Amino acid sequence: MIAFALRRFGSALLVMVALSMLVFLIFFATPGVDPARQMAGKNPSPETIAAIEAEFGLDKPLPVQYLSMMDRLVVSRDLESYSNRGVRILPQLARATPVTLSLVLGAAVLWVVVSIVMGVAAATLRGRVWDPVLMGLALVAMSMPVFWVGQVANLFSQDRWHDTFLFSWVPPLGYTPLTEDPVMWFKHLVIPWITLALLYIGLYSRVLRSAMIETESQDFVRTARAKGLSRRRVLARHTLRNSMLGFVSLFGLDLGALIAGSALLTEVVFGLPGIGRLTYRALANLDLPVIMATVLYGAFFVVVLNALVDILYARLDPRIREA
């Protein structure tokens, strides 16, 4: 098991290095991208552009620029933004990371718990009226775009019903750190959690229901029942455990992508200053240092979470360890 984990984390490190090189090359290969000209403002003189290139090392060969940027990002950690000169990247990343983690992890707990309950209930009640009702609700949740749900939630909680007992507790859009005021932190995030989790509740409950129905027809489940095991024990120890393999793999991919910045729409709608908003602004300004930092941040979470999922997958199914 240890060797399996080391192989997964070793390959994850190689993926991060390769991704950083790819992002760097794509940035400079994109037609019309010239960071020095953009920083110089309108109608810059050749001397101004040359001075900026010399200041930021943009006049050096690309391999030297890449190694210098990675050294300042990872080793010395003093890499500065192109668009906001003098502003260091890592403090911005450090301020945005807790916001995104608070949003994504809270929503993840919500969607995992609710989707397991709905999926198990739909599978065990198959053929009864509650099965199509639950799956219909899941389909509705999957069909609603996150930005639309967020806007509707803001319409009622911030405007029309804000003075009623339902939403009078909802604070203005924004974010309060957990360390400053845990109660206000929760109030700021509870509606974004629900908004972000709805899509995944619908998807995961349907995936789990299908997997459980398929697993119930397997020989080992029928054998467990023939041995006289209780229905609850068969459900928990055999059916649900084996049905969670696909659930776990999907969860690792989605959680990593959301932490990497895919929660952008939710952050924008609710005014949360997270990684998604930081990445969006960097892309709009062609700010390569910030783009590189956020991409590596996202790649770290994606590859690490997928490595952890592979390890957990191998724990659930020992046959995977031999792969």
Image (cartoon, rainbow, N blue to C red):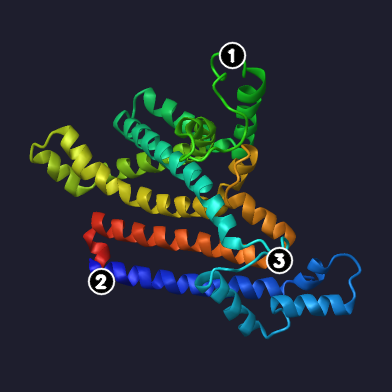
The residue wearing badge 3 is 82
- Observer able to see residue 217: no
Mark 2 secondary-structure assignment: helix
User: Residue at image x 25%, y 66%?
Assistant: 321
Q: How crowded is mark 2: few (under 14 residues within 10 Å), some or many (20 or more)?
A: few
Q: Where is residue 291 in the image (x, y as percent from the top left)?
A: 63, 63
Q: Which of the 4 quarters of the picture holds residue 171?
A: top right
Which residue is the extreme one toward the top? 164
User: Residue at image x 25%, y 46%?
Assistant: 241
In terms of depth relative to the viewer, which is nearer, 250 or 216?
250
In terms of depth relative to the viewer, which is nearer, 119 or 311?
311
Disc ID at residue 3: 2
User: Residue at image x 50%, y 32%?
Assistant: 190
Q: Position of residue 81 (x, y in %)?
A: 67, 64
Contact (CB < 8 A) between labels 2 and 3? Answer: no
Q: Position of residue 57 (x, y in %)?
A: 69, 79
Q: Which of the 4 quarters of the picture holds residue 188?
A: top right
Pair 2/1: label in front: 1
Mark 3 secondary-structure assignment: loop
- Observer able to see residue 61: yes
Disc ID at residue 164: 1
Pair 2/3: label in front: 3
Determine whether, in the image, residue 205 is placed left or right of residue 149. Answer: left
Q: Where is residue 95 in the image (x, y as percent from the top left)?
A: 55, 51
Disc 2 or 1, which lies upstream in sequence? 2
Q: Distance between the residues labelled 2 and 3?
A: 42 Å
Q: How far apart are marks 1 and 3 (CA)?
A: 47 Å
Disc 2 or 3, which lies upstream in sequence? 2
